[in-house]
Image (tube, helix red, strand yellow):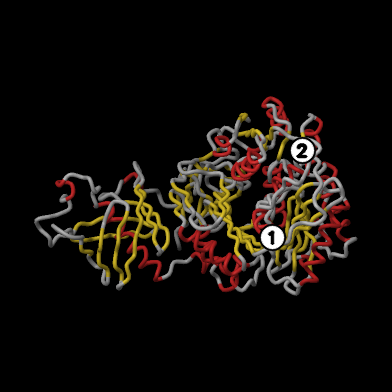
Amino acid sequence: MTNLTSLTSPTSLTSLLVANRGEIAVRIFRTARALGLATVAVHSDPDADALHVRDADAAVRLPGAAPADTYLRGDLIIAAALAAGADAVHPGYGFLSENAGFARAVQDAGLAWIGPPPEAIEAMASKTRAKELVRAAGVPLLDPVDPATATAADLPLLLKAAAGGGGRGMRVVRDLDALKEELEAASAEARSAFGDGEVFAEPYVERGRHVEVQILADAHGTVWALGTRDCSLQRRHQKVIEEAPAPGLPDALRESLHQAATAAARAVSYRGAGTVEFLVTADGRPYFLEMNTRLQVEHPVTEAVFGLDLVALQLRVAEGAALPPAPPEPGGHAVEARLYAEDPARDWRPQTGVLRTLAVPGRVRVDTGFADGDTVGIHYDPMLAKVIAHAPTRAEAVRVLARALAEARIHGLTTNRELLVRSLRHPEFAAARLDTGFYDRHLAALTEDTPDSARALALVALAAALADAAPAPDAPLAARLGGWRNVPSQPQTRSYRSGETTYEIRYHPARSGPPVPVDQPGVRVLATGPALVTLEVDGIRRMFHVKHESNSPEVHIDSALGAHTLTRLPRFADPQDRTAPGSLLAPMPGTVVRVAEGLAPGSPVTAGQPLLWLEAMKMEHRIVSPASGTLTALHAATGRQVEFGALLAVVQEETPA
């Protein structure tokens, strides 16, 4: 990072409270400690033992679980700062980071606000005012559409929350008949995330690129435009892979984006870090989207390219320091991937549970709010970590990041890791043919199993079985001979499940030497142990690292063939595991936020009809009828919290005539 000691500050902060949680709080604390500041965390009840709490010098409880009762309670956060002796508040991103009222209240309490002036937040929170500012810089705009008067000619429309970002409260509408329902859903999601349900509509540009400019400004008139970022690969309007600089932009377009972003910052006397976002069409026309008056999730790629610590600069600017006239020269290329606890193949379904292992090798930066053994709960975003690679060229940075993710050991939860690796290695991404429709086109192919995947899983299951059967090296002789039988014609059998597929592994134990697999042509066992199995597959030696979970049927296997989690199956099925036909079970723990109007036992339903909506981990999920028939039971009610696998409703399928 660039040396910042030359930035002299009129005032000096001593203690910093971060009004946030997770990886951003941990990341801010890291810089605060390096600058000699004491650190204060706040936490909800579910976060009482979270990494950001353990990482701080002091922590203050915000009673409750829901964001509206905790991290969105500005009065409680300010009281916490005063009680803990903090003299500054950093909002991170999300929650109250773009709330002008909170910023003003922080300052009124005599605390330093690590962010832009409240007036600048208010100006950019007004989408109309923000667009007027960049219109003066000559950047074309997407004019808003009044949903009340929208016609088919206005489609498709993009609904957006007025009070925040991060994809919350965003919906694409392609059917006028669905507009009313989508407006209500977007407004409800925005209100839950930001405390403000205001939503507006604008034209949705197909196959556009999401390009943004990082801004940093001081109180002395200096404004830096720290290059561009491309954030086009998105799921549910939330970014997945980001990079800097945005590849393939003509110099003239890049310069015009810098000028527009700088002009917008100067127009509101901006201070601190911010981001101006644009949509660039396939033919290279830029449209201003919005200005985020906060630090962005993807700020590490800009830090890597410019050799800066943006959080340190935020703190210096808040202390009154003056920036040099120009930023340092950029160098190389950086790519960031967001690792989520979610299942992309099942509608991005978020996952909850214990994160057993999170280890990412290689020359990459890892920003995370979790450590081994931490629990991923239902209340917050399911992002586990951000992994960032920096290299002299884009191709090398992409290659380094893909390899680091492929070799990572992530145990305990289903994640999007495999999707990230395949995305980074996809020909379109490698060629920098980027647009926001990437996953609309390629998700099915990126998540499907292949014949190679089936062979790999069979080998993984064999490795799991051999590791399960292998005694520890220091085990007594009787244990080490325990797998041998007097009747060698009868192989030993172990069964494992991966998803919906069951693998029955059979092998002949040997009195001496490694076991011999059955029905695995071309496979020879070279060595076995509880944690490492070495196989020769078609003449190629492959090593399988195995981790067994205590008091759990799960087995985690990492190898060059990928990372897999298998479930050991008992010899006999439990009759209680059976579920009545037509039962709708909660796919995750969460809160029922809506039930379809008029729905009650006895109601006729059709296949695919939305019956109720669950909110979990900052996302809303529809539960639909699996078939046409009659609703015979309804166990869900608005506001009720449900556990994973809870019975929500039962649909009796109609009998064909």
Q: Quadrant of residue 152?
A: bottom right
Q: Residue furthest left?
A: 486
Q: Which residue is mark 2?
A: 113
- Quarter of the C terminus within the rendering: bottom left
| Horizontal side of residue 577 vs 91, given as left or right | left
Furthest-right residue in view? Answer: 136
Give the residue type at disc 1: Val
- Residue 81 appearing in the image: yes
**Label 2: which secondary element:** strand
Which corner quadrant of the image does residue 391 belong to?
bottom right
Relative image position of residue 431 (x, y in whole percent) = 61, 74
Q: Which residue is mark 1?
A: 172
Mark-to-mark CA distance, 2 and 1 = 35 Å
Q: Image point 72% across, 63% down: which residue?
A: 211
Q: What's under tag 2, amino acid-wise?
A: Trp
Residue 167 can be seen in this image: no
Q: Earlier in the sequence, mark 2 or mark 1?
A: 2
Q: Nearer the viewer, residue 140 or 218?
A: 218
